[in-house]
Amino acid sequence: MKTGVYKSIKKDGSIYYRSSVTFHSKHISLGSFDSEEEAHSAYLDATGIINSESIYTPDDYPDANCRSLSFNKWVVLNNFKNNGIYIKTPIYLKKKYFNYYISEHDILIFDADDLFYYSEHTIMRRGSHLFVTEYGMQVNIASRYGIRNFARPGIDFRFVNGNDKDFRYSNIEVLNTYQGVTIERYKNSMHYTARIHINGNFTIGRYDTIEKAAIAYNKAADLLEKKGIVKKFERNYIEEMTAKEYIDIYDSLNIADKIVNYIG
């Protein structure tokens, strides 16, 4: 068997080949291959990176003449060699931030504070949605930054520098943190619509501030639960508002008749 190659057998009895390399006393798997030649080629690519006096970065991959080594492993090995930290996910460290390579041309930027999380979680993309798997469930990574599911870019949140792949905390501005509230523009002014879901979406009302819409959602949820609706509605918390201010607004808000008179 060629250096760095190990023959294995699948459950169905078919043979495949694994390749690995050891660097700085770390045993690194390079992947599984259909042939011994491909597995050995990946090993040669990896040792070429490790032994080269040149400093490569992920951007050098197209010209690196890698025959069998995947792009992800290219990133992992070069980050380990250049930055001295082994990370199993395709992360390349920079000063105070890091790049996460979903693919060669799909690159996300994160603050260094997020390194531990993304070194343990593989990011996947489905269209514009980015997610990781936790305990067998798909979790939208936007939720880590206060961005709700179905939030609309430019309305409910925005990327300050215009780069929607830059997830550094300073680059994310959340404009709407509230459950059941939609920001809408009407005749050159902003309106805030509160809606609640009970076997379909019900409009609670339209309000002149986002806080009123958020409180209206809470009030509608309270009314529905008193009517015996068995559903756990998430409540909105209004920061920097005293209990008296909250109650005064709560009591003054009108709620749509179809919510007030709803029969489950």
Image: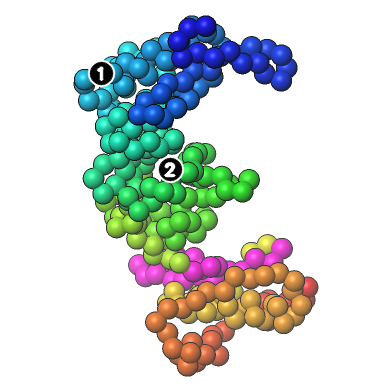
Number of the label disc, if any, that sits on residue 119: 2
Local SS, label 1: loop
- Asked if the magenta segment contains residue 181, the reply would be yes
Instruction: Give the residue type at disc 1.
Output: Ser
Local SS, label 2: helix
The magenta segment is 178-199
Name the residue at 56% across, 45% down.
Answer: 133
Name the residue at 54% across, 14% down.
Answer: 6
Percent across and percent down for residue 129 are 49, 44
* Whether residue 262 can be seen here: yes
The residue lying furthest to the left in this view is 54
The relative height of residue 94 versus residue 57 in the rendered view (above or below) is below
Point out the image quarter for the C terminus. bottom right
Instruction: Give the residue type at disc 2.
Output: Ser
Which residue does the numbered mark 1 point to in the structure image?
52
The mark tally for this picture is: 2
The relative height of residue 12 versus residue 194 in the rendered view (above or below) is above
Query: Where on the picture, by quarter, is residue 158?
Result: bottom left
Mark 1 closeness class: few <14, some 14–19, many ≥20 residues within 10 Å: few
